[in-house]
């Protein structure tokens, strides 16, 4: 049996069907005696360029070991499933079980932001923002004083 790395992109409107698709495709592999070494659901991501006027897609990565018959069936399923926008199948020399760079970067960002949806601002940037607001208030007060002095001169 050979080792493959598979990435497929699902139409964003069909994101809720992704778990069923993964189950179906892993079933095709395991029924033929293959193994799934790594399965990562990367979720919805912005694509590098639009495909058929679609700007986002749901990404899934699989590293599998299977026969050519199972791979042919997977390829056939990918081709005739309208929900799959693109797929890429790469033959590998050995199985890959390490965490992918995409997932590693995502987990680093989560740790950095403390698991929140939005990034934290540092205290230093808060101070800078407060200084900017103080400067704006000072400028508006200066403008008001200038207008008063101009009225007095006239």
Image: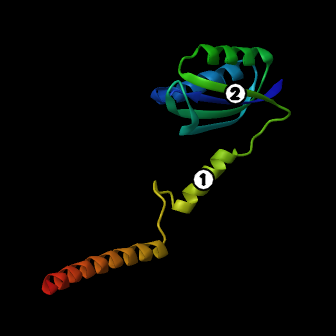
44 lies above or below 136: above
**In the rendered image, which quarter contains the C terminus?**
bottom left
28 lies above or below 97: above
Q: Secondary structure at mark 1?
A: helix
Q: Residue furthest right?
A: 93
Residue at numbered disc 1 = 107
Q: Position of residue 141 (x, y in %)?
A: 24, 80
Crowdedness of circle 2 by 10 Å Cα count: few (<14), some, many (20+)? few
Crowdedness of circle 1 by 10 Å Cα count: few (<14), some, many (20+)? few
Q: Position of residue 122 (x, y in %)?
A: 49, 71
Q: On the image, which quarter does residue 65 sit in?
A: top right
Which residue is painted at 73% across and 26% down in the image? Answer: 89
Residue closer to the observer: 49 or 61: 49
110 lies above or below 92: below
Do residues under tags 1 and 2 come within 8 Å of each other at their CB atoms?
no
Mark toward the start of the polypeptide (1 vs 2): 2
Residue closer to the observer: 51 or 148: 148
Q: On the image, which quarter does residue 5 sit in?
A: top right
Q: Is residue 3 left or right of residue 132?
A: right
Which residue is painted at 51% across and 61% down in the image? Answer: 114
Residue closer to the observer: 72 or 140: 140
Which residue is painted at 69% across and 47% down in the image? Answer: 101
Q: Residue furthest front?
A: 154
Residue at numbered disc 2 = 88
What colouring style does the render use? rainbow
Q: Is residue 150 left or right of residue 19?
A: left
Residue closer to the observer: 120 or 48: 48
Q: Is residue 145 left or right of residue 109?
A: left
Q: Secondary structure at mark 2?
A: strand
């Amino acid at each position: 049996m050979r080792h493959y790395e598979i990435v497929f992109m699902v139409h964003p409107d069909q994101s809720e069907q992704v778990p069923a698709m993964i189950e179906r495709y892993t079933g095709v592999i395991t029924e033929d005696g293959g193994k799934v070494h790594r399965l990562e659901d990367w979720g919805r991501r912005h694509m590098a360029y639009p495909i058929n006027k679609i700007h986002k897609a749901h990404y899934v990565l699989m590293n599998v070991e299977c026969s050519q018959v199972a791979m042919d069936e997977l390829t056939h399923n990918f081709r005739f499933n309208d929900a799959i926008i693109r797929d890429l199948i790469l033959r590998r020399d050995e199985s890959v079980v390490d965490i992918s760079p995409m997932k590693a970067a995502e987990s680093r960002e989560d740790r950095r932001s403390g698991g929140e949806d939005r990034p934290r601002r540092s205290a230093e940037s808060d101070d800078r923002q407060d200084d900017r607001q103080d400067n704006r208030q000072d400028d508006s007060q200066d403008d008001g004083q200038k207008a008063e002095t101009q009225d007095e001169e006239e």
